[in-house]
Structures are given as structure tokens and as C-alpha cells.
Image (cartoon, helix red, strand yellow):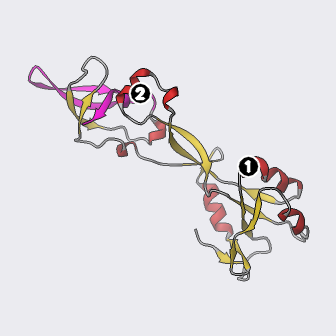
């Protein structure tokens, strides 16, 4: 991300990076709204490992990390703000709980160009920046794996096809195609990711 000291040429209302601690969405942004300060707090959909207590027995013993999407800040501890023209209540802003101050370059606040904010907003789908982690990072085509659950338990196979989706788009209906050896013949089977494990 390109950041430029606010002394350089900018439109009359540049964006600034406001640093804070804790959950900025619930503690700082409502206070900014009361001061008529526009804020932008981008969040990213990221895959996080599901706690063991929320997994089925089959998922726990598969050894595969079971992931679910979570919303996390794009830039932890930072929200972008834009002061209204003629804003002079800076003391109120910096007296807010959880606010640490502006991101600075030396003694000058760092201004974030409009095109950076516009680019972030353009990447949003329903207010969230989609994290794109390919499913092929979990398994690779041609990789030999063991079937841990189902009719072919303990058989080994080679992954022939991986769905061209992100990890967050994999659900129980998403299948990987394996080729296993049944009675001396290579046979294709479609299995869920949690049914197979790496060797």
C-alpha cells in the first residue's frame, strides 16, 4: 500500500490511517460517527481452523485441518478516516478510548490516496474483501493420498482432479477425484476432502 505524507498534493479531504487497540468496529467507529468523521474499516474473509470441539468424529480423525471463513481486519488495529471540511475537534478524537493516534511519517500524518481506498472498495463483495486461497494448496494434483473414511478406507489413491475453487468455497458436497486400484484396474472415485489424508 502506498502511503504519502500529508504535506504532498492531495484533494481537500485525504484519508488517514487511525491506529487503535481492541475491536475498532465496536469501540471506535461508532464514536467516529458521532463526531461526523467518515470511516472505512475494510475486512477480509479468511479461512480459520475450526476448533476441535466443533468437528465431527470423522473430521477429527481425518487429520485434515477443517477450515471455515472468518471476517478479520484488512489491517489489524487500523481504520481509515476522512475528516469533514473545517473539522477542528481533534482533542475529542484523540480522547476516545482505544484510539492511539494517526499513522505518522516523522511529525506529519500519513495521507492515503483516494485511489487506494477505491481499489480496496472495488475488491469487496457484499462489504467484504474475499480472501482467495486456492483449494490446491491443501492437496496437489498427482499427489498420493490415503482414504481414511468411507467404503474404500485404507486404500491409497492418486488425486486426479481438484475443484477450481477457493478453500472457503469447499463444502461437504465438493468432491476431489481420485484414482484407486480396484482388482488391478485404475478406478476413478469422487470423495470429500475430509475423507482423505496425506501420506
Q: Name the residue located 67 percent from the left edge and 57 percent from the top edge.
A: 77
Relative to 10, is 115 above or below?
Answer: above
Q: Nearer the viewer, residue 23 or 11?
A: 23
Magenta stretch holds residue 133:
no
- Residue 81: give x, y in percent of width and height: 76, 62
Give the residue drawn at x 58%, y 54%.
123
In the image, which disc is placed on residue 178? none
Left or right position of 90 against 22: right
Quadrant including the N terminus: bottom right
Q: Which residues are magenta?
A: 171-199
* Residue 168 in the image, given as x and y percentages of width and height: 49, 39
Q: Is 176 one of the magenta-colored residues? A: yes
On residue 60, the disc is 2
What residue is drawn where x is 45% and y is 22%? 56
Relative horizontal placement of residue 102, taking residue 120 as reference (left or right): right
Between tags 2 and 1, which lies in front?
2
Q: Earlier in the sequence, mark 2 or mark 1?
A: 1
* Residue holding disc 1: 25
**Relative height, residue 139 to residue 17 (above, below):** above
Question: Which type of secondary structure does the marked residue at label 1 adopt?
Answer: helix
How far is mark 2 from mark 1, CA to CA? 34 Å
Q: Is residue 13 above or below residue 176?
A: below
Circle 1 residues within 10 Å: few <14, some 14–19, many ≥20: some
Q: Quadrant of residue 38?
A: bottom right
Q: Position of residue 3 (x, y in %)?
A: 63, 73
Amino acid at each position: 500500500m502506498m502511503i504519502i505524507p500529508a504535506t504532498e498534493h492531495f484533494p481537500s479531504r485525504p484519508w488517514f490511517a487511525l491506529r487503535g487497540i481492541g475491536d475498532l468496529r465496536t469501540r471506535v467507529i461508532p464514536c467516529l460517527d458521532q463526531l461526523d468523521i467518515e470511516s472505512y474499516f475494510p475486512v477480509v474473509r479468511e479461512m480459520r481452523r475450526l476448533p476441535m470441539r466443533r468437528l465431527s468424529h470423522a473430521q477429527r480423525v481425518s487429520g485434515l485441518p477443517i477450515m471455515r471463513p472468518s471476517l478479520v481486519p484488512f489491517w489489524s488495529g487500523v481504520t481509515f478516516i476522512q475528516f469533514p471540511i473545517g473539522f477542528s475537534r481533534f482533542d475529542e478524537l484523540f480522547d476516545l478510548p482505544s484510539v492511539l493516534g494517526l499513522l505518522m511519517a516523522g511529525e506529519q500524518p500519513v495521507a492515503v490516496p483516494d485511489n487506494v481506498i477505491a481499489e480496496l472498495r472495488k475488491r469487496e463483495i457484499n462489504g467484504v474483501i474475499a480472501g482467495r486461497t486456492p483449494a490446491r494448496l491443501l492437496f496437489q494434483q498427482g499427489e498420493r493420498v490415503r482414504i481414511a473414511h468411507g467404503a474404500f478406507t485404507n486404500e491409497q489413491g492418486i488425486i486426479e482432479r481438484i475443484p477450481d475453487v477457493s478453500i472457503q468455497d469447499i463444502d461437504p458436497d465438493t468432491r476431489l477425484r481420485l484414482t484407486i486400484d480396484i482388482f488391478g484396474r485404475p478406478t476413478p472415485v469422487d470423495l470429500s476432502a475430509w475423507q482423505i489424508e496425506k501420506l
